[in-house]
Amino acid sequence: MRVRFAPSPTGYLHVGGARTAIYNELLRKSLGGEFILRIEDTDQQRSDAAMIEQICNGLSWLGVHWDEGPFLQSQGVERHRQTAAALLQDGKAYRCFRTPEELDEARQDAQKRGETLRYRDYFEPATKEEQERRAAAGESFAVRFRMPDSEIRFSDFVRGDVVFPAEALDDFIILRSDGSPTYHLSVVCDDVEMRITHVIRGDDHLSNTPKHVGLFQALGAPLPVFGHLPLILGPDKKRLSKRTGATSIEEFRDLGFLPEALYNALALLGWSPGEDRELMTRQEMEELFTVERINAGASVFDRDKLSWINAQYLSGSSLDQLMPHLEPFLAEVGLGDLGDDQTGRLERAVDLHRTRARTLGDLAQMVVPYFRPSLDYDLDLCTKFRKQSQLPQQLGALVEGFRNLESFTAETVEQALRSLAEEVGVKAGALIHPTRMALSSAKAGPSLFDLVVAMGQEASLRHLENFAAFLRQNPIEE
RNA sequence: GGCCCCAUCGUCUAGCCAGGUCAGGACACCAGCCUUUCAAGCUGGCGACACGGGUUCGAAUCCCGUUGGGGCUACCA
């Protein structure tokens, strides 16, 4: 079996395209075969080389692998033209000498009468002899495919059997008057050439499929199996657009989502393996994937669910998997050149905070205090502590207690803090909370004793001393 | 307008094809537990078969219609 993902490089890789690519890959993996990447750049004006690279990069980042390509559709134009010529020769297509203006006018007239213009009802194709005579005389023409005069039916594994009555079908252009092939001709030619067996693409092509079926038949090529994926909607239930949030894969990457998480989320959008399975490894998805379980209805892309899935991957992945993805975000918060000697501390810190983060950006932010020589404390957040006149000296005692510890572990640190609390007659919490503030300038976070150990003895003492000094300088008298 | 497609909690969905479980799960939200705090985790709660007709002892499930969404109707893809 051979599948293809065939984006047109008129824009970046968006979530809809990415999901189509994912389903293609999943089907390929579950059935075995080849996955071909083909860039549909027949519209040269709107195609852009930078976009092609962006699409490939997006797929690579997501972890979608293709076996062949990327092939540029534009490289096949000569072959497509020859196909059109053969169709013309066989009388399966004909030269159309009407100008676009003429057609436009006829269409508008029909519109006024409340009708839809059907080319083949209004314009009798010229006889073959006349066609050749006028062409030889240098008259400009487009090549129009003669649709069969019968209904077209095909089966779609998402929709079931789809029937288009003969009256709804019309002859359509396969070669423009400048000799360039149109999309419909090119896709079919390439799908035939590449021996594609399964065509998975967006819903918007469902109505185009009868044209393609007509072409496949005229070419005497076996029909591939079709599957048309429903649209992905934004939270407003309208087609996903930039107005309502991120739409490109790169945006999601920059927002701090892991590729595995996005892949999982996108796979679940319109497909479900049943049995209430949601979080799956790629291998599990490949094993569980069947086209029969793809939904026909459009679905809203839920950012909250993606965030949750991302959080699950953030806490579930190994540090080895996680760290490379985190790197760019560390750089963004000024932690780009931490030196190898800090790797251990960094990993401990990441490990401590990963269950608290939803995105890589969150995580990078949380880790910042571990690598700052001193922290800025927020006066308002510290109001409570500033009112406690005994606190600076208690923290001083804590510094001494920590300094004298022979081994610096969560247990020994906890013991030291608790015994000091008992000594000075306060609850442990009365020392725990200011210590957390001292070390992280935050009022909440991981278990304090884990935090102290991850911070390290030297840095902990330094922050504690700084914080005590800050409190002495900013007291609130009561 | 014509043709084609779609319709279960706010969202993603299971169930539909082979009618018969309090319509199940997840996200979000709310509450409780855990706890030095915040998360995570655990427990519970809230919440849906778009509407109207049929067929049937019985309909989310089958049929028809309505409404609402979407696509195509290009010498765009």
Image: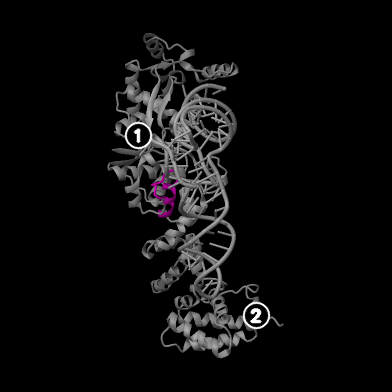
Judged by depth in the image, the label closer to the viewer, 1 or 2, is 2
Relative to A76, is A178 on the left or the right?
right
Q: Which residues are magenta?
A: A260-275
Q: Residue at x 32, y 48 (%)?
A: A287
The kind of secondary structure element at disc 2 is helix
Residue where numbered disc 1 is placed: A75
For residue A386, which numbered disc appears in the image?
2
Q: Is residue A301 above or below residue B30?
A: above
Marked residue nearer the N-terminal end (1 or 2):
1
Q: Looking at the image, can residue A240 be seen?
A: yes
Tell me residue A390's x, y (percent).
63, 87
The kind of secondary structure element at disc 1 is helix
Work out which residue is located at the far right of the displayed protein and give it: A478
Nearest the viewer among A95 and A110 is A110
For the residue marked with disc 2, what is the amino acid? Arg
Are tags 1 and 2 found on a single chain?
Answer: yes
Decide: few, some or many residues near mark 1? Use Cα within 10 Å; few <14, some 14-19, many ≥20. few
For residue A436, which numbered disc appears in the image?
none
Q: Looking at the image, can residue A8 be seen?
A: no
Q: Is residue A445 above or below residue A78?
A: below
Tell me residue A300's x, y (percent).
51, 44
Q: Residue at x 36, y 42 (%)?
A: A24
Magenta run includes residue A261: yes
Q: Residue at x 57, y 19 (%)?
A: A111
Q: Is residue B32 above or below residue A207?
A: below
For the residue marked with disc 1, what is the amino acid? Gln
Task: Report the chain holding disc 1.
Answer: A
Q: Quadrant of the C terminus of chain A?
A: bottom right
